[in-house]
Amino acid sequence: MSLIAKETTSRRLRSELKATWAFLGLHVDLTKRYLAWDIVWLVYHLITAFAMGYLGVSAGVAPPYVPAGQSFVAYLLVGAVLWSYLSVIFFIVADTIALERWEGTLEYTFMAPVHRFTHLSGVALVGLIYSVLRSLLMIIILWWAFGLSFEQVNLAACGVALLLGSLAMIGLSLCAAVMPLLSPEKGSQANHILSAVLLLASGVYYPITVLPEWIRWLAYINPVYWMLEAQRKALLAGAPLSEVWGDIGALVLTGLLYIPLGYLLFAWAERYAKRTGLLKRSG
């Protein structure tokens, strides 16, 4: 590669990195503007987690599906916190188009001389950072309230599952982000329905074996289910990576499926929206 070509590539890379940082700054400003709503949803998820924790306390004896020696309360709380974490990533990425349309910036974002991969990567980075900080706050509050113990946690298995599960969820969220592009009026509502289906077939509050056969198969293509399986083993039983390879492999497969599929679907939906005039603020 010639020196000129290298300098051009370097400038382009710096430009894209600056754009990614700009999208991060944009969402920081939006978070400040809608901070009251962020607090509302944080409280909502915290109360949901508390309700599930007290359900475990009131049960007294752990049900048969909880592995021997594990706390039923911790089993439920892990599910509540991880669902909160992944669902926030889902909605930040999936509803980014709806939010920009509401703010009146959608047309400008799509006209900006920024690669769409940079745009979507910036949004995904926002989702990851925000969700991690939010979940850490929830864990601290729940640890204090329920006296949870983290003595058996396997950090390596937990970290790998968290990273791969987050990437797989980002890919699935990109698929969902197509909805508000195709339907300005009903796209966000469709994403809420999809979120409810993900929760139903996830095993957050119960094992998927209780589900009817015609619903259970959804769990196997649901990254929430596989991440939850790996995290419960790593957090509650201290399972090493060698014992969660099956779940890790499923997360890798779902990520390899959803990330390119989501990007390709988004690229197609963007071309369609531009051609049909769906980028305007009102539907």
Image: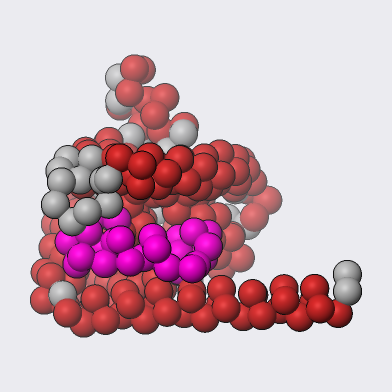
Q: Is residue 129 left or right of residue 200?
A: right
Residue at 38% over, 60% down: 110
Could you say which is closer to the camera, residue 272 or residue 19? 272
Residue at 36% over, 65% down: 109
Chain part drawn in magenta: 97-123
Please say whether residue 73 is visible from this viewpoint.
no
Could you say which is closer to the camera, residue 259 or residue 118? 118
Residue at 20% over, 45% down: 184
Percent x, y of residue 253: 59, 40
| Whether residue 19 is situated above or below residue 244 in the rendered picture | below
Applied colour scheme: secondary structure
| Whether residue 247 is situated above or below residue 41 in the rendered picture | above
Q: Is residue 161 left or right of residue 191?
A: right
Quadrant in the picture for the N terminus: bottom right
Residue at 72% over, 76% down: 8
Could you say which is closer to the camera, residue 248 or residue 18? 18
| Whether residue 62 is situated above or below residue 27 in the rendered picture | above
Could you say which is closer to the camera, residue 250 or residue 154? 250
Please say whether residue 9 is visible from this viewpoint.
yes
Residue 249, by quadrant, is: top right
Residue 78, by quadrant, is: bottom left
SS assignment for the magenta stretch, majority: helix
Q: Is residue 51 left or right of residue 66?
A: left
Percent x, y of residue 174: 42, 49
